[in-house]
Image: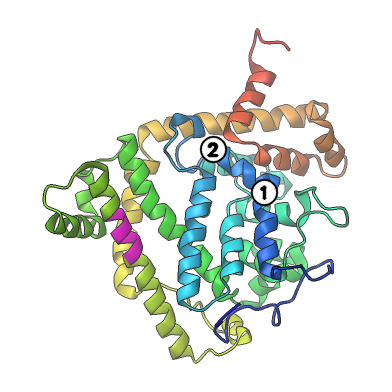
Amino acid sequence: MPDLAPYAVTENNSRGRQVPEPYPVARGEFQRDRDRIVHSTAFRRLEYKTQVFVNHEGDLFRTRLTHSIEVAQITRSIARALHLNEDLAEAVALSHDLGHTPFGHAGQDALNGCMKEHGGFEHNLQSLRIVDRLEESYASFDGLNLMHETREGILKHCSPRNAELLGEIGKRFIEGRQPSLEAQLANLADEIAYNNHDIDDGLRSGLITLDQLDQVSIFRRNRETVEADYPGLGGRRLIHETVRRMIHQMAMGLIEQTRANIAAAGVASLDEVHRAPRLVAYPAGLLPELRVLKTFLRENLYHHYQVLRMTDKARRIIRDLFQAFMGDPRLLPPQYLHMARTDTPRAIADYIAGMTDRYAMREHRRLFAVGEIH
Ligand code: MG
């Protein structure tokens, strides 16, 4: 890869794969990781999983798949500007949401509640579990056998208890070390993506309005710039021109602040990245504006009564499914029944977490709809 900074992850400073493999032909190790993720079953399922809106509510809203692609785009652009390892950054971005349950955060919270006595459920840990164990594609190993740094990037946060259980990959949480800059970047690019596309989806759905968004200074300011440049512009074009300026402002802020942080810390190697404080960051001036934006989205979109009705129903579906399978694990499909012999609740959580929105609804109907016996 051309022109990498001395603190970027490379194949030379990487800790490699758990199961040794021959060097890939005509591509690098991190390209191979990215490719394995794109070819995985869990990645395809993202197409039918909720970001904010349930998949069938409209064809134009973001799904986990299009969200992940937008995160990868932003991550890759910023990684290039900072001379980081684009392939690693992209691999982390594309896989960051693989462990999400159906129905977004409501689904995760419900499943975590069901798993309370059995080790809990956390989508971020589940993403790692998928790439480490659950994908069944390769003859000589479970999972995708990804590079250490890709796995490290997927595991964004972790409780001390889970860190102990995870061994090597969990160590940095106990020792207080940072992940690579590529991983730090993918994490913040996730935020840039959803803060902006949720405005777009929110407006498209009619659950929030342009008038309401005047409370959000970063939106209002950019909208006023667009209107000054293009008087009379309205509708979709006005929204898109505003949102693209916001993405640009956040991405540029991140690039400049991160460069300054790296210089100030005198970081010149990957090892120093691990030992330094978090270096990928927004400029301090942008933080209050981002907080206002997040609060606005939470209060007006994520907690909109129409969204809450959906999430309430979603929670019920997840709980019903979990209880039905716990009550009689023989209702599980054979592959999961097999896994249930070692750990029944975990096998059920794996099965439910892997469902798409529509599969979960169908499964719920199959198990509970009275008058439908087939
Ligand atoms: Mg995400």
- Asked whether residue 348 is in view, the answer is yes
Spot occupied by residue 364 in the image (x, y as percentages of width and height): 64, 24
Spot occupied by residue 55 in the image (x, y as percentages of width and height): 50, 34
Foreground: 32 or 65? 32
Spot occupied by residue 16 in the image (x, y as percentages of width and height): 75, 73
Residue 120: assigned label: 1
Part of the protein shown in magenta: 242-248
Identity, as a three-letter code, of the amino acid under mark 1: Gly
Q: Quadrant of the N terminus?
A: bottom right
- Total count of labels: 2
Identity, as a three-letter code, of the amino acid under mark 2: Phe
Q: Nearer the viewer, mark 1 or mark 2?
A: 2
Q: Earlier in the sequence, mark 1 or mark 2?
A: 2
256 above or below 136? below
143 left or right, relative to 225? right
Q: Which residue is mark 2?
A: 103
Spot occupied by residue 217 in the image (x, y as percentages of width and height): 22, 59
The residue that appears at 83% across and 69% down in the rendered structure is 22
Q: Quadrant of the C terminus?
A: top right
Residue 129: assigned label: none
The residue that appears at 57% across and 87% down in the rendered structure is 6
Residue 217 inside the magenta-drawn segment: no
